Image (tube, rainbow, N blue to C red):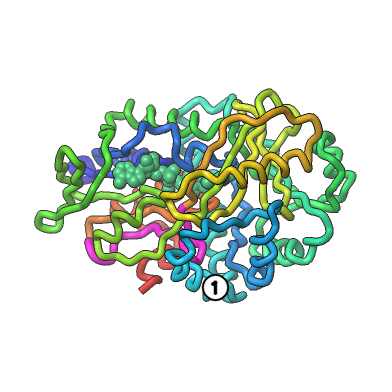
Amino acid sequence: MSENLKIGIVGAGIQGVCSALFLQKKGFKVTLFDREDPGSPAASYGNAGHFSPYASIPLNRPDIILDIPSMLLSSAGPLALKWNYVPKMIPWFYNFLKNCTSKKMMHTAKYMHQILDIAIPAYDELFDEIDIAELVENKGIMYIWNDQNLKSRELEIKIRDEIGAEQQILNKKEIHDLEPNLKKIYHAGVFYKKAKHTKNPGKIWLKLFNLFLSKGGEFKKSEVETINFSEEKPIIKTKENSFNFDKILIACGAFSKKLTDKLDEKIPLDTERGYHIHFKNCENLISRPVVFSNRGFGMTPMEQGLRVVGTVEFGGLENKLSKGRIKNLVNNAKFLLDGLPEHDDEWLGFRPTLPDYLPVICPSKNYKNVFYSFGHHHLGWTLGAISGKIISQMMANENTNLDLEPYSSIRFF
Ligand SMILES: Cc1cc2nc3c(=O)[nH]c(=O)nc-3n(C[C@H](O)[C@H](O)[C@H](O)COP(=O)(O)OP(=O)(O)OC[C@H]3O[C@@H](n4cnc5c(N)ncnc54)[C@H](O)[C@@H]3O)c2cc1C
């Protein structure tokens, strides 16, 4: 039956492309729409490249509320605001604070763990069909910190033990043995052995997109303006044309709200803006991703050089890149490594984030042939394949054997 069904997907980021590939496996005929060519410049290109199955502890935590003012005031810290956006951000922030109880944090951790735990096997189903030999490294991911932050790290370590996420606590010597070029500013750390990283997220994204095309998938380079309906069947409207489908998926990352608002779903999606820079020819200074927890930034060895990634900036989708945040990344990288040259490639990207730090992976509450997959915040790269697999099973009316209610948009109403 799937063979006869036409699916339209709005957004060809990692979520859209992975969904398209899993839908094709089930025999659906899929068309992807994106205003840009896949591969860049969206979040799926510029991220830190971590596959992080361990990362189930969300940012909505009781202990973080007290830290927010000092984080905002520190120029070395991870948090920033665009003041012109503060009034628009107030409802999201109020909702976020309501989600900072221990109970809500544990709820998010449990249901992030449910999908993170099966995220890498889901990618393996797609990676079987493309050559990733030079692009994915199995060297784990290391977090380090100095002692002023140990208390909050202890909370995370305890919760990870409770939910069964594998971790190895590191002392100073073990950190030095793994990454001898790091300056010895650290006190302790944690190593996630099963985590992986890619040396070029954009290249993997493009390979997956080309696989989709090679299997007969269609791509329309166009901005989708609205969704109409004819007898419950969705019609995707671009500036130039209209396209009729049996079912559609909205997977526009942080931009999804522009379309869901038009479908009368008030989903409280906003963005946490993040940045990257590269230090060319410095990728060999470390062997694996290193995250410095105190300052909330990380460094990943990539094909383009050493990619330094970080910042959570609340400022919406329209404000320009902040030079102050670039300076923050440069200074932070120099805090951990000696001998870095001038940086290149200043990039701003948009993490799609809901106030409870769970994604929306569900059918629309108002239209039975419309589905959503967005809001994967800091983990949308890791969760690309598993979310796509779940969406394909939902669209095919199959049982996933997962508890999917926590990812429903109905939770906001
Ligand atoms: C600095 C930074 C570091 C990160 N590091 C990691 C990491 O290490 N590991 C991890 O798991 N995650 C990471 N993330 C998160 C991850 O990158 C994102 O969650 C993920 O890429 C989101 O994918 P997406 O497909 O939902 O959205 P996007 O990648 O944003 O793609 C959305 C696509 O929709 C298109 N689009 C939008 N609106 C329309 C429209 N109306 N019509 C047509 N097309 C449209 C856009 O052009 C875009 O191509 C990071 C994010 C940032 C910003």
Which residue range is magenta in the image?
352-367
Res 19 visible: no
The amino acid sitting under disc 1 is: Leu
Please provide percent x and percent y for residue 33.
28, 39
Q: Secondary structure at mark 1?
A: helix
Please provide percent x and percent y for residue 50.
60, 42
Q: As rendered, which of 232 and 63 lies closer to the eye? A: 63
Q: Is residue 66 above or below residue 191?
A: below
In the rendered image, which residue does mark 1 sit on?
Answer: 97
Quarter occupied by the C terminus: bottom left
- Position of residue 398 in the picture relative to residue 50 (left or right): left
Q: Residue furthest front?
A: 84
Dominant SS type (magenta): loop
Q: Residue at x 64, y 73 (%)?
A: 62
Classify the position of ligand 1 by quadrant: top left, top right, bottom left or bottom right. top left
379 in the magenta segment: no
Q: Is residue 409 above or below residue 10?
A: below
Please provide percent x and percent y for residue 124.
51, 38
